[in-house]
Image (spheres, helix red, strand yellow):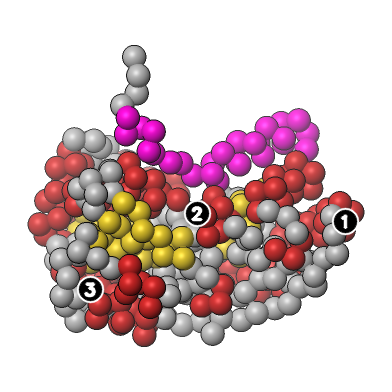
Amino acid sequence: MRLAERMSRIGTETAFEVLVRARALEAEGRSVIHLEIGEPDFQTPRNIIEAAKTALDEGWTHYGPTQGLPELRQAIARYIARTRGIEVGIEHVSVTPGGKPILFFPMLALIEPGDEVIYPNPGFPIYESMIRFLGGVPVAMPLVEEKAFSFDLGRFERSLSDRTKLIILNSPQNPTGGVIPRRDLERIAELVRDRDVMVLSDEIYSRMCYETPHFSIASLPGMQEKTILLDGFSKTYAMTGWRMGFGVMPEWLVSAVNYLMVNSNSCTASFTQRAGIEALEGPQDESQRMIAEFRRRRDRFVAALNTIPGFRCRTPMGAFYAFPNIRGTGLKSKELADALLTEAGVAALSGTAFGYHGEGYLRLSYANSMENLMEAVTRIRKYLTQTVTAPLKGGSTLEFE
């Protein structure tokens, strides 16, 4: 018996593979600093946990509506109005077990074999995985350091064709920490507003903008009905294991997502949805403190990375990732990432785990303690100093424009 041919086109997330390797080293007694997983190192805020406990005690342990509890969808609609400045109804909201179904289900509903999908590269690897799995044609939009890891608008315009069906945006961005400026989003909207094309705007890190307020392309004239807005609870509220995300999209596409939910997950767990209401409408103090701490870590960690010979790291504008340029070491990205894990005890991801255009970079999550981040820098510097024989170019700090 053989697997279906389409299974040969599906990808994975390297972060989980590296985590397994790191855990195996730890089982042997090795010390490993984990900078590979994109997960807050904080606990879920106490008020959210208590809301889940109350929900369990009250019996929210049965099937719920496929689209999500009306009370949570109403809370999400109010949240979107507050944070994006657009009015949506509960009929536009889909609640799913995690954010990934809001990638997979709308793409499954929209993409025909041969349709082109423009996506960021380097970018979250599931974008390209799903495009290929569905028989679509991935059209990579390189995110280059010289453009602050935003889109090259000229290249974007040239990439649009009659076969373009979907455009994927991610801001703040994984893995680079880049943010697409509002003026660039306005230009993208101008180019696609009159085309038969949808935009999937992955805004899962929307609350983690450190320099400028988050801005969504969905809030631009004529774009709300063309945008699938993806958000969730995992990053903002340290709820990665709760598996709860949501999408805001046109009602006709919500209907398609509902069919796919019925055929796969049935519904999202009811007690976690009750906790989600508390997350959005309860006290925000713990979440705000977490985000402030990420910014503090960012500033020190990036400054420290720029002291490592051969490294050059821009200051990320959002999310909790540093994306240092390591070309000055003379090593390939995967070569260095593998060596740092096995020889230095630092679990990092090769930039190529996020696409071809990630060569020459590492992704380092600063969702770890300041002490561990500084120790990681010490270990990386020691490894390079003792092992790399080629002259290393000194680091220098670069700022986003």
- Residue at x-position 58% and y-position 67%: 294
Give the mark nearer the N terminus: 1 vs 3. 3
Q: Mark 1 or mark 2, which is nearer the start of the sequence?
A: 2
Tell me, for residue 192, which label it has, or none: 3
**Residue 163 to residue 269: above or below:** below
Q: Along the horizontal axis of the image, is 97 left or right of 325?
A: left
Query: Residue 216 falls in which quadrant of the image?
Result: bottom left
Provide the residue span drawn in magenta: 5-32
Indicate the amino acid at tag 3: Val
Indicate the quadrant where residue 32 lies: top right
For label 1, the residue is: 389
Residue 200 rendering spot, x and y as whole percentages? 29, 62
Q: Is residue 90 left or right of residue 309?
A: left
Residue 98 at what x, y percent from top left? Answer: 35, 48
- Please report the residue visible at 10 percent of the width from the left and 57 percent of the height from the top: 252
Q: Sort mark 2 into few (<14), some (14-19) or many (20+) by Cα contacts within 10 Å.
A: some
